[in-house]
Image: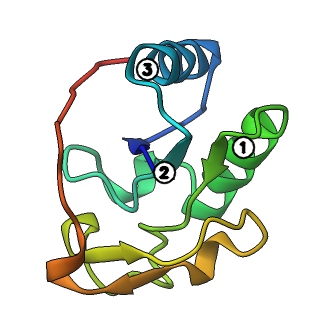
Amino acid sequence: MNVALFGGTFDPIHRGHLAVARAARRQLMLEEILFVPSGVPPHKRAGAVTPFHDRHAMVVLATAGERSFVPSRLEDPDLVAGTSSRARWNSSSRAAPDSRWHCASECVTVRRCISCLA
């Protein structure tokens, strides 16, 4: 399964983010794109960013019309157990995105890394 992690502050998420994700899905033949709002971005002051749960809610609303766009709580400050490089995704169900990640450094294979500023 070709899956991408699309991380960002998403404060707020906008059409540019969605356009980049659609282009990546098409170009890279991705089956799913997980939208990962950042916890507390290191380049921003903690109070300068909308709270995580509000930004996640915006991502949920913005991606609702795209089956392959999956909102993620991977960096939820209340749930974080590790970084994405140590995460293993154990389900393809959209029903419970919060329960799909488990720490396991040996479980991720990075095929290619793509950077984009949106």
Q: Which residue is mark 2?
A: 37
Label 3: which secondary element = helix
Amino acid at circle 2:
Pro
Distance in Å between CA atoms under marks 2 and 3 = 18 Å
Q: Is residue 92 left or right of residue 26?
A: right
Q: Residues within 10 Å of mark 1 (few under 14, many from 20)?
A: some
Q: Depth check: give the residue in front, 14 or 82.
A: 82
Q: Residues within 10 Å of mark 3 (few under 14, many from 20)?
A: some
Amino acid at circle 3:
Ala
Give the number of the mark in front: 2 or 3.
Answer: 3
Distance in Å between CA atoms under marks 1 and 2 = 10 Å
Label 1: which secondary element = helix
Q: Depth check: give the residue in front, 34 or 17.
A: 34
Amino acid at circle 1:
Met
Query: Vertical placement of 10 versus 41: above or below?
Result: above
Query: Vertical placement of 1 versus 52: above or below?
Result: above
Q: Residues within 10 Å of mark 2 (few under 14, many from 20)?
A: many
Q: Which residue is mark 3?
A: 24
Q: Residue at x 30, y 87 (%)?
A: 103
Q: Residue at x 60, y 83 (%)?
A: 99
Q: Residue at x 42, y 46 (%)?
A: 48
The quarter in which the C terminus is drawn is top left
Query: Vertical placement of 92 versus 77: above or below?
Result: above
Q: Which mark is residue 58?
A: 1
Q: Which mark is residue 80?
A: none
Q: Quadrant of residue 81?
A: bottom left
